[in-house]
Image: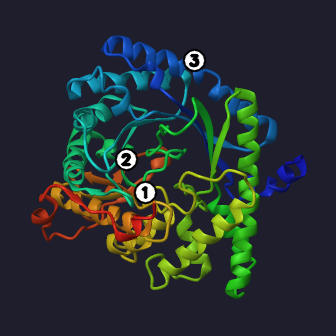
Amino acid sequence: MINIFEVNETNQMIERENLDVRTITMGISLLECCDSDLDALNEKIYRRITTRARDLVATGEDIARDFGVPIVNKRISVTPIALIGSCACRKPEDFVTIAKTLDRAANDVGVNFIGGYSALVSKGMTEADENLIRSIPQALAATEKVCSSVNVGSTKTGLNMDAVYLMGEIVKETAEATKERDSLGCAKLVVFCNAPDDNPFMAGAFHGVTEADAIINVGVSGPGVVKEALKAARGQNFEVLCETIKKTAFKITRVGQLVAQEASKRLGVPFGIIDLSLAPTPAVGDSVAEILEEIGLEKVGAPGTTAALAMLNDQVKKGGVMASSYVGGLSGAFIPVSEDQGMIDAVTVGALTIEKLEAMTCVCSVGLDMIAIPGDTPASTIAGIIADEAAIGMVNQKTTAVRLIPVIGKDVGETAEFGGLLGYAPVIPVNRYSCEGFVCRGGRIPAPIHSFKN
């Protein structure tokens, strides 16, 4: 049992070290909403979300007040809309109406974001999948809270290169559609390999078809807590360093477990998973990069960065899994450039490049995240970067993702402003040599040999 003593133990972490529960995310199945009539489908979706999640925000605020634990975001994830809209949506514009319905429902229940404007196309695309994907630029331009994701590969199926190439074009079109806001739409669009069904973090959250009717997933965070704990381990060996990270991750996760249990009980919705990810923010002292620098790097990107991140990721998981019965989602260390002041600083001084970030994604929990690139970057280059990152996930049996933002009208050295938790980012250079002849071949890259385990 979790007791109030454990909560009191975290007071200093909350008050001085930016500990928070980053999100309570309610996953909602929309399978019962399927209808061949588009108007009826939209009405069912709106009614389903606003009924199920009507008390989500108030409950989160009550728990935060009762236990003194900040809960930053309350969010919703839904069944991938490509599945739900397949009977009613005959063209991309039809799917846009569903995006607007999701946005209206999110606004009416008061959540920060709603995820699940998604398609799962790791092996092939249906007509509905392709229509949803082609609707993404217009959908994200026309909404404020809708987040979109597309899964283009997996260890079991390989990489759908038709989808990869299409997503390069879609990312570029989304940037153009939202260019007046520094191409903000791309900050709400993730391209996955091995996407999990139970991720509570945006922009990649969706409610997988293997999930229950409704579920509560909680994402915890605490980079500042880990950094402060590591100050006591300065000069110590790796055994002491690892034990310090594990113990801190345990305490952070126990707070998330308490919140998840309370939210589940008060809302009458089953508890799903705790996501252990260290999710940074632009706030001073809330940075994964600063943890790595506390470990001993002069700047993130220096030699040793990948090894330090691998160790951090592993110890966070080892500590966290002892604190909760159900751990899932992404669980590890996020390295989003725009949302981490230490990462921003490292890019600005030239210590961190997109190539080094790609190497780091081999051992972190996600991938190339919230990276601003020149607005004139070709769609084929974006597709090539997606393919590289997806290949890392496919071969290493892990989730990887790409959230690139080609900022229209801006070039290397300029800054894109996204606001809030999304922060800001310096535009980072990308390799200018073309990969067009590779990414446009079509078809699939086969699954790796170690995928055949049945």
Residue sitting nearer the eye, 214 or 54: 214
Residue 337 versus residue 188 in the image, above or below: below
Nearest the eye: 442 or 400:
442
Mark closest to the chain's N terminus, 1 or 3: 3
Identified at 47% across, 55% down, the residue is 339
Q: Label 2 is placed on what type of residue?
A: Ala
Left or right side of 143 for 8: right
| Label 3 packing within 10 angstroms: few (<14), some (14-19), many (20+) | few
Q: Do the residues labelled 1 and 3 touch (CB within 8 Å)?
A: no
Can you give x and y, in whole percent of width and height, for residue 444 in the image?
22, 57
Q: Is residue 414 visible?
A: no
Q: Is residue 328 above or below residue 132?
A: below
Answer left or right for 380 relative to 214: left
Q: Residue 51 carries which label?
A: 3
Q: Which of marks 2 and 1 is nearer the N terminus?
A: 2
Question: How far is mark 2 from mark 1, CA to CA?
Answer: 10 Å
How many numbered marks does the figure carry?
Answer: 3
Q: Residue under circle 2?
A: 187
